[in-house]
Image: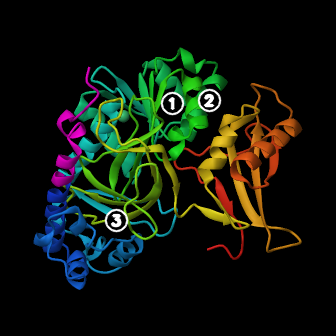
Amino acid sequence: MSRMWNPMLETMDRAELRSLQVDRFREQVRHAYEHSPFYRRKLDAAGIDPDDIRTYEDVREVPTTKKGELREAQGGEPFPYGDLLAASPEEVTEYHQTSGTTGEPVRQADSWGDWEWWGDCWATVLWAQGIRPDDRVFFPFSYNVFVAFWAAHYACERIGAEVVPGGNLSSAQRVRKMREVDVTAFASTPTYALRLAEVAREEGFEPTDFAVDTVVCAGEPGASVPGTKARIEEAWGADVYDHAGATEAGAWGFSCDGESVGLHLNEGQFLIEVLDEDGEPVEPGETGEIVITPLNRTAQPYIRFELRDEIGLRESAAVCDCGRTFRFAEGGVLGRLDDLTKVNGVLLAPTAIEDVVRSYDGVSDEYEVIIDGHEEKPDLDVVTVVAEENPETGVPASEAGDELRKRLKQTTSITCRVDVVAYESLDRPELKADRLDDRRENHV
Ligand SMILES: [Zn+2]
């Protein structure tokens, strides 16, 4: 069966796709200009007339939008979206907000039309990953104001799959529910997928005996980190897929059933630019920052939004072995630019530590990273990785610590302190895991 939700878009000739994107981008800018005072000011100041946007080069003349500008606009009238809103309040049907891990949350208004669009974006993800009408999909979360799982839930309904909502239950109750009704798939953060497998074993089940054959990961980049992906696959005996999205952008990336580990960019619903430090597009094989414009999103549009996610484009520009012409980010989201930090002058990406820890079975799935100044030499940064003993392999803590220190040095070029503590000493977060604790005083 075809694994494409919209085969026409997903296999479109690239030149044709680019021209379609530019047309939709122009419509999006025109809509923002006509309905959002925030964008009208911004575009007027830059001397942009939406009708003049004809080529990809014209797109790049349009100013980018930064997260700080959104917060500032929402601090003003009218409450609660400020003059960012490009719809009448009557048209708004959905309220969500960002998690606020990097500052004040941004509020997100969507109309019913936008919500249909969200469903379509997520259906593209789920269909590519094999979710079908005969699936029974479990959502082990209380979704609250965070958009991702609501949108995934709605997309399952669009596909015709059966949804089992698992909010407001303990992890043990969730595992029992999954077993009781034989769910065939579930969606969660990679961290929580591993946690549920642990809880299943504590409850006397073997997770690989469950009917689960698909795990869809979201919220953290783990399912594109080979070490983490392998751990989840092994724990559940299931295919593990990645998704990337943001409240302000939408569900913009998804892994396919091709050979490579990473994410396709959903270029049917987004204009995604991958730019270097000077704002120039990078070539295949290079890494860059995403600047994204959701196409066909009306109530609160984003024009060239600086997502702050770093990705690396696959070297080969050839069509993926899944048949899609959409570009591919090898290894998924390599890091949030806000998370990349310098340690003694060396750039450290948190996903690099994750891959080292999760690729070594001498420690458990959970870990934490603390960066602090040296006790006696405050100018010197000290990175401490706290990991847990793995009861399954029984490697002694001291031996596991030495091995992990050696592997971290090889991969990150940073000499870390490693502290291996007893199994289950660390917290298991359900939603986004914030594993990096930067305690340096001068750190901004
Ligand atoms: Zn593919």
Tell me which corner region of the image, top left, top right, bottom left or bottom right, holds residue 396.
Answer: top right
Residue 398 horizontal/vertical position (percent): 88, 39
| Residue named by callout 3 | 305
Residue 139 horizontal/vertical position (percent): 42, 35
Tell me which corner region of the image, top left, top right, bottom left or bottom right, holds residue 289.
Answer: bottom left
Residue at 83% over, 42% down: 401
Q: Does the magenta stretch include residue 18?
A: yes
Instruction: Tell me which amino acid carries mark 3.
Output: Phe
Name of the residue lying farthest toward the bottom: 45
Q: Nearer the viewer, residue 356 or 241?
A: 356
Tell me if residue 118 comes above or below residue 210 in the rendering. Answer: below
| Residue named by callout 1 | 174
Q: Nearer the viewer, residue 441 or 307?
A: 307
| Residue named by callout 2 | 199
Q: Distance between the residues labelled 2 and 1?
A: 9 Å
Q: Which of 182 and 332 is in front in this view?
A: 332
Q: Contact (CB < 8 A) between labels 2 and 1? A: yes
Which numbered mark, 3 or 1, is in the foreground of this view?
Answer: 3
**On the rendered structure, is 36 left or right of 305?**
left
Instruction: Tell me which amino acid carries mark 1.
Output: Arg
Q: Distance between the residues labelled 2 and 3?
A: 39 Å
**On the rendered structure, is 148 left or right of 431?**
left
Q: Contact (CB < 8 A) between labels 3 and 1? A: no
Instruction: Tell me which amino acid carries mark 2.
Output: Val
